Image (cartoon, coloured by chain):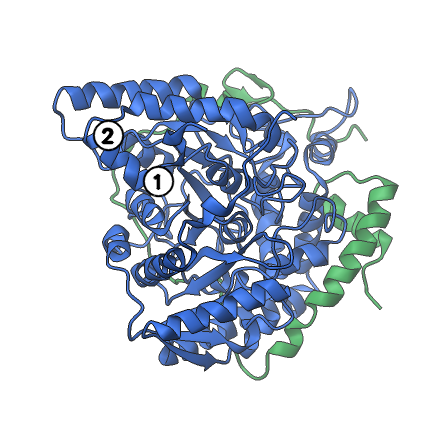
Chain colours: A green, B blue
Amino acid sequence: MSELTPDLVRHLASLARIQVTDAEVDRFTEQLALIVDSVAIVNKAVEGDVPATSHPIPMENVFREDVVEPSLTQEQALSGAPDSAQGRFKVNAILDEE
Amino acid sequence: MNEIIKKNASELVDLMASGELSATEITKAHLDRIAEINGTINSYLHVTSEAALAVAADVDRRRAAGEKLPLLAGVPIAVKDNLTTTDAPTTSGSKILEGWIPQYDATVVTKLRNELMPILGKTNLDEFAMGSSTEFSAFGPSRNPWDIERIPGGSGGGSSSAVASYSAPLAIGSDTGGSIRFPAAVTGTVGHKPTYGAISRYGLIALASSLDQIGPVSRNVLDAALLQDVIAGHDPHDSTSLPESLGSMAEAARNGSVKGMRFGVIKQLSGEGFQPGVKKRFDETLALLTANGAEIVEVDCPSFEYAIAAYYLILPAEASSNLAKFDSVRFGMRVNPGENATIERVMAATREAGFGPEVKRRIILGTYALSSGSYDKYYGAAQKVRTLIQRDFEAAFAKADVLISPTAPTTAFKFGEKVDDPLAMYLNDVATIPANLAGTPGIAIPNGLADEDGLPSGVQLLAPARADARLYKVAAALEALHEAGWGKRMMDFAPELKVGA
């Protein structure tokens, strides 16, 4: 019934950068299939041309005065990082060796 | 039990003004209570005793010097752990943020500090506020003081249980689909979700940005109003912050009245199918209102039937985007799966280890709802439902001044009952979710005990956007009617909490 398959769940998890175990894939596939089937009724609710609401109380062009305000120092910005070097966030290689 | 901790915030204000109690005595009494019961109730993930006592001492010193103090100066408060604090770890109930100390205070926290309110500590929640029971907290569930085998509601079960167990007179909550109101209902306390934008979200770790709203948690309506007056107001740091003031909530609460008010009973949330004791107390409340000069009308909100479905598309979609920032780079946990692992594998391993099951479920669901091919079918349709729900509210408020429903379908359930059944868990918020989708305010107050289990049930009042004051006015009046009928306060029904047994 549902289009949620283990392969799709694995693919979605990889898009979301979450490593998943086989057991998790099985459990999530079953649970998410039920959830997706149940939320699909939103399609039945809407007839005709209804505008979408992205924001409950719409506001436009919200600006503040263009003045410099205090912000975090470099040290503060790096203080919570798992690793840093030379004033920068330090991470593993971006690209595979191949 | 030390009598100090049973006092409401407004009573503490008076006792400090008359010199009967000092802020230090009050703060110490609450810290003692926390030391006594937190091992059992687990309301607090982190207690900030020293900082709280320092603020209390400062208040006492200033008062002795004859300084004019802010109204709630010296009244201690608990803060939900998804608000950033520079002097305490902020985890949002997640392992991925364990030990993180933010570099800035949330605007709400700054306002509490400016008010000279001692912050007792940070309260527990379902991980990133995803849940209705605190069972999804990475740091263990909080317990319901009415029965420690039962959930205190969620996500704000730390705040609700702190207030209900007298380990704080006031607390801050956040409400994305009911996370203030559901915990209030099941712990016999008061919680208000203000109009979207009434309170700055700056420094609130976002779950779903278009639904999240910070609000007050307390044991009575006036206290909630006093607290909302402290934390409300425009903030240039939050672009969704309302520019205008919504007026004094405390003044509204002090002028409680239901006479001549039209209460709309929502056909779809009239209590049919709810736990019988919840429904019975609700019907009695309608009769009580009628007997006191209010008018009861029925309103039809057909799109509310789709509210949970729309919510569980919009929320995961926004959450999957908001939680992308937990990527092992700028803050929080990093798990390295191997010496030459690329950053992509580090991120995936970190998020696997750092996130719990409900967070993973919702991120994957949100990723699905936003993916090409399902965007229109799911996310797009859900946003249209949101419009229909707003229209239903508009039509309802043409016939009624406020809407009324049970806050939740049931009383507090037992641990483990729903934790493996996401759909059953999601139903707890059936009555609270519409207000988040529409951005309108909602207050939950106690509504007596259900006959079958003797546990608290709640009643919810809803008003149009920006009409928070109207809710405080009618909620204060209904609370007074209830207390007159019961001959005591709701919390006086609670059994004495036995700890360490």
In the image, A25 versus B501, the foreground residue is B501
Residue type (three-letter) at the residue carrying disc 2? Met
Numbered circle sitting on residue B8: 1
Q: Chain of mark 2?
A: B
> Residue at 83% of width from left, 47% of height from top?
A25
Q: Residues within 10 Å of mark 2 (few under 14, many from 20)?
A: many
Q: Position of residue B139 (x, y in %)?
A: 64, 31
* B204 in relation to B424, above or below: above
> Residue at 33% of width from left, 63% of height from top?
B474
Which residue does the numbered mark 2 point to in the structure image? B16
Q: Position of residue B127 (x, y in %)?
A: 62, 40
Task: Work out how far the residue at label 1 is from the one at label 2, CA to CA, in angstroms.
Answer: 12 Å
Farthest-out residue, bottom: A48
Looking at the image, do the residues carrying marks 1 and 2 touch, with CB atoms under 8 Å apart? no
N-term-proximal mark, 1 vs 2: 1
A74 lies left or right of A88: left
Regarding residue A77, the answer to whether it shows in the image is: no
Q: Position of residue B418 (x, y in %)?
A: 72, 51
Farthest-out residue, front: B487
In the image, B15 versus B159, the foreground residue is B15
B471 lies left or right of B451: left
In the image, B122 versus B222, the foreground residue is B222
Q: Chain of mark 1?
A: B
The secondary element bearing badge 1 is classed as loop
Regarding residue B432, the answer to whether it shows in the image is: yes
